[in-house]
Image: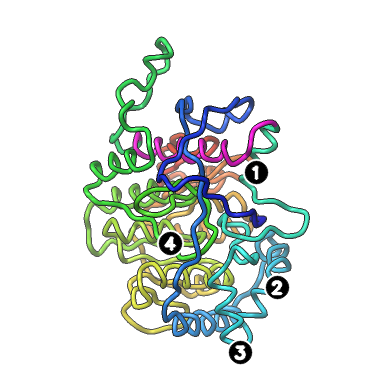
């Protein structure tokens, strides 16, 4: 993300601005926006505590992963590797202070670029969500519209859980959403979600300059909103089994893994490319504690295992569920088919949440398998995405 000046206009947890002229932007939303919308805030600088042992572990794991990793010709391995050269040099080197600075403040570098909004945009680029909004509406402040998008996503999470009624639109306008008029702020909607899941959610913000909705539980950003629903779906499928084993292929920063852990799904493996593994290891080590995480090549009891994609070729472990969110259709066909074949021999169930805009779709991967059963639904919290539960 291009670093913008911090703005926290009011001290209130839910400052209010007037409803903007939406224009084409409304196509991003699942339902009509509320009459009033919160402004956004950015997370302040945080105390990273005694994180140097974790930094050392991340550096060591990255070196092991990079030595074993065989890049493909995909965007993730070519273009992003070039954009993140500074990060690679810092992690592969011996200067702990340089690596720590890169890991602690990703808003000042490109480490998270491509999978999370807390990132400095490369020259000539802007953060993708900002770009989408500005492309759809050139008259309103993009941050005002972004706040509406986040709030719409949070309301959709509550609706998916049955914590909030889905608005009925085939009526007079002043009756749309009439059953939930008393729950409009971020905290009020989070209270609804808490009531449905039986837990009080918290949103850790270990990095400065994370942009999102203000709440009494932390700043609620775009990826965290979606991660709540994704983790809840995983926990639904797990049905309370303490031994339930999940693998997530391409896990972004690891926010879904964080919430799944909170929901009781603790035997969780993440597979990704080395640079993203480094981001995941540091983030999850900060928010769950360093002992909860096992990095590539480490022994130990940490139930949240972070491994390199190169290790899949020799991996014989079985999983109860393999998850892929917003990455399968971004891969080259060869890479996507490799992961699909791994899933076919390593589990009996896949949860996929992906768009179908690119040439390759997830359905392309399974449609030729006669013993596969798949259910397809529009994804609750983001238009243009398909949720597929695939079993055999």
Mark 2 secondary-structure assignment: helix
Q: Position of residue 369 (x, y in %)?
A: 48, 47
Q: CA distance from mark 1 to mark 3?
A: 40 Å
Residue 227 left/right relative to 265 = right
Q: Which mark is residue 358?
A: 1
Q: Residue at x 30, y 42 (%)?
A: 193
Residue ID for mark 2 = 85
Residue ID for mark 4 = 345
Residue ID for mark 3 = 94
Mark 4 or mark 3: whose residue is earlier in sequence:
3
| Mark 1–mark 2 CB contact (< 8 Å) | no
Q: Nearer the viewer, residue 373 or 125?
A: 125
Q: Nearer the viewer, mark 1 or mark 4?
A: 1
Mark 2 or mark 3: whose residue is earlier in sequence:
2
Mark 1 or mark 3: whose residue is earlier in sequence:
3
Residue 147 within the magenta-colored segment of the rendering: yes
Q: CA distance from mark 4 to mark 3?
A: 39 Å
Q: Position of residue 295 (x, y in %)?
A: 44, 77
Segment tinted magenta in the rendering = 139-159
Q: Residue at x 42, y 51 (%)?
A: 227
**Dot 4, how many residues are within 10 Å of its Cα: few (below 14), some (14-19), or many (20+)?**
few
**Dot 2, how many residues are within 10 Å of its Cα: few (below 14), some (14-19), or many (20+)?**
few
Quarter occupied by residue 348: bottom left
Q: Position of residue 194 (x, y in %)?
A: 26, 45
Q: CA distance from mark 2 to mark 3?
A: 16 Å
């Amino acid at each position: 993300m291009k670093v913008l000046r911090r703005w926290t206009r009011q001290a209130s947890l839910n400052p209010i601005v007037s409803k903007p002229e939406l224009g084409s932007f409304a196509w991003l939303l699942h339902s009509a926006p509320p009459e009033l919308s919160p402004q956004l805030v950015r997370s302040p600088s945080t105390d990273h505590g005694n994180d140097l042992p974790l930094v050392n572990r991340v550096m060591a794991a990255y070196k092991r992963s990079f030595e074993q990793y065989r890049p493909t010709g995909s965007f993730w391995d070519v273009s992003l590797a070039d954009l993140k050269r500074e990060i690679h040099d810092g992690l592969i080197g011996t200067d702990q202070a340089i690596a720590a600075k890169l890991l602690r403040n990703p808003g000042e570098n490109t480490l998270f670029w491509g999978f999370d909004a807390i990132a400095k945009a490369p020259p000539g680029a802007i953060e993708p969500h900002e770009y989408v909004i500005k492309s759809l509406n050139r008259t309103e402040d993009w941050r005002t519209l972004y706040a509406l998008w986040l709030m719409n996503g949070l309301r959709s999470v509550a609706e998916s859980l049955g914590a909030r009624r889905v608005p009925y639109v085939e009526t007079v306008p002043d009756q749309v959403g009439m059953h939930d008029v008393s729950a409009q702020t971020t905290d009020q909607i989070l209270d609804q979600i808490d009531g449905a899941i039986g837990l009080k959610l918290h949103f850790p913000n270990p990095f400065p300059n994370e942009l999102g909705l203000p709440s009494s539980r932390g700043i609620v950003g775009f990826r965290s909103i979606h991660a709540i629903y994704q983790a809840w779906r995983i926990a639904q499928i797990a049905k309370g089994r303490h031994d339930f084993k999940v693998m997530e292929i391409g896990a972004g920063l690891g926010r879904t893994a964080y919430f799944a852990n909170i929901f009781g799904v603790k035997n969780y493996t993440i597979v990704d490319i080395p640079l993203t593994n480094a981001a995941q290891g540091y983030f999850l080590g900060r928010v769950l504690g360093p002992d909860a995480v096992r990095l590539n090549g480490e022994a130990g009891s940490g139930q949240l295992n972070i491994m390199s994609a190169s290790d899949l070729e020799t991996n014989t472990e079985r999983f109860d569920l393999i998850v892929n969110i917003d990455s399968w259709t971004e891969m080259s066909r060869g890479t996507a088919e490799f992961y699909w074949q791994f899933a076919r021999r390593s589990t009996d169930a896949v949860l996929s949440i992906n768009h179908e805009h690119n040439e390759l779709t997830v359905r392309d991967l399974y449609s030729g398998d006669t013993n596969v059963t798949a259910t397809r639904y529009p994804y609750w919290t983001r238009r243009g995405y398909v949720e597929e539960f695939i079993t055999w």
